[in-house]
Amino acid sequence: MLPRLKILLYILMFFALKINLFSQTIDTSIVEKYGQLRVEGNKIVNQFGTPIVLRGMSLFWSQWMAQYYNENCIKWLKEDWKCTVVRAAMGVEMGGYLENPTTEINKIKKVIEACIDEGLYVIVDWHDHHAHENENAAIEFFKEIATLYGNKSNIIYEIYNEPEQISWKNEVKPYSERVINEIRSIDSNNIILVGSPTWSQDVDIAANDPIISKNIAYALHFYAATHKQYLRDKAKNALAKGVALFVSEFGTCEANGSGILDYGEMDEWLNFMEENKISWCNWSIADKQETSSALMPGASGQGGWIDTQITESGKLIKQKILVLNTPTNIKQEKEIIEKEFNLLQNYPNPFNSSTIISFSINKNSNIKFDIYNSLGEKVQNILNGNYIKGDHSFTLNFLEYSSGNYFLSCEIENQRKIIKMQYLR
């Protein structure tokens, strides 16, 4: 009886692992899914080197819309709007950080901690048009943020919101390099967004004289009814030079935040960003009476907004985020891949020396298996070859590795599945 009981136990454990894996696939947060982001060439990629697109909302200046800087609002943006990134806009001048540093930084911390709890990426934005004149304050702020949260993969730094019509070479770039050096003395990994002159539109100028540092991307800002094909051309030139872009702020309307909502140009911009895998945040979660606001005057600071509390701009952007970010699409994508091949959870897991990898394919295929560490760095290619249709398994020996979490990537015809493995040496 004992061997039969062992066999039954193994079968139950196998199905429990499959159920757990399916649950994790559907419920995994975006930060768990993508992990530590980095810049490769002109793209932002996930922990496995695959280009990704984040889509979400920017909060308004912190000193003027503090009611939205709270965990309930962030939770609503994740659950109801399906945002994968939120931008916290630290107001600097005009009653902001320079005058009230403790009050303002505490608002930013609330948003950061809410995003960490919800598994969202968060842009920590120094929302200043004269940051090069407030360099010491910027360094003080970013050093504190990096010290507190730099070990979290959620963090993206934006160090100069919108430089005005000043020199890239003589003012913006030297400021940016000094702030970057201070951040990198604490946080060596997380992406840093750099602004460019003319309100973060001169990305082509920055690309001609880029900052030499890893994981740097350039913020591109536009307002659809004002900034049209000429700015997309500047962005194309920057991408062709090999720099990565992140649209950390855009509006659906004119550059003053009001005027017409330009549906045609918004379609052009959204198509451009999707084609080039450029992440974005819309301006803004605010109830100010202007076209770019996502909310009607008086909308609650705690989320829970119904359609009548959302502006036309807000409805447009929410619908785009829902379509592009919805977990249903992730589930459908998983189901499509399942028809082509299936990768089971390794067994046993956790393990202390070796583990069994099992997979099945529905046609003769070339398959590539890679192992990544918890930072998303590839540590080994273990298999790369042709397999016939059917079920397969192999033993993976781990004696040469240190204890920790690892990811096994299985790639077939540009489709990929990943499992998380825990090695206890």
Image (tube, helix red, strand yellow):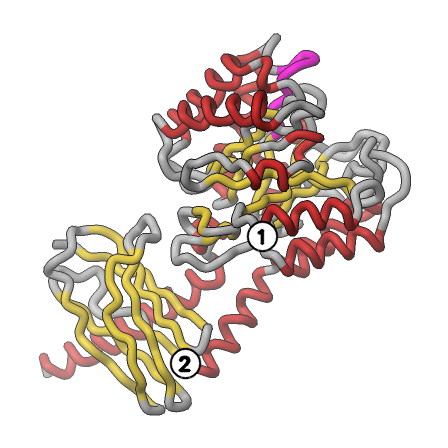
> In this rendering, would 413 be left or right of 299?
left
Q: Is residue 115 above or below residue 164?
A: below
Q: Secondary structure at mark 2?
A: strand
Residue at point 56%, 54% (across, down)? 53
Residue at mark 1: 240
Q: Is residue 103 above or below residue 222?
A: above
Is there any visible trace of residue 201 in the rendered image?
yes
**Residue 341 numbered tag:** 2
Specify the amino acid type for callout 2.
Phe
**Residue 282 numbered tag:** none
Tag nearer the camera, 1 or 2: 1
Which quadrant would the N terminus be assigned to in this image?
Answer: bottom left
Specify the amino acid type for callout 1.
Ala
Residue at point 40%, 77% (across, down)? 412
- The outermost residue toward the top is 99
- Mark 1 surroundings: few (<14), some (14-19) or many (≥20) residues within 10 A: some
The prevailing secondary structure element of the residues shown in magenta is: loop
Of residues 136 and 85, the one drawn nearer to the viewer in this rendering: 136
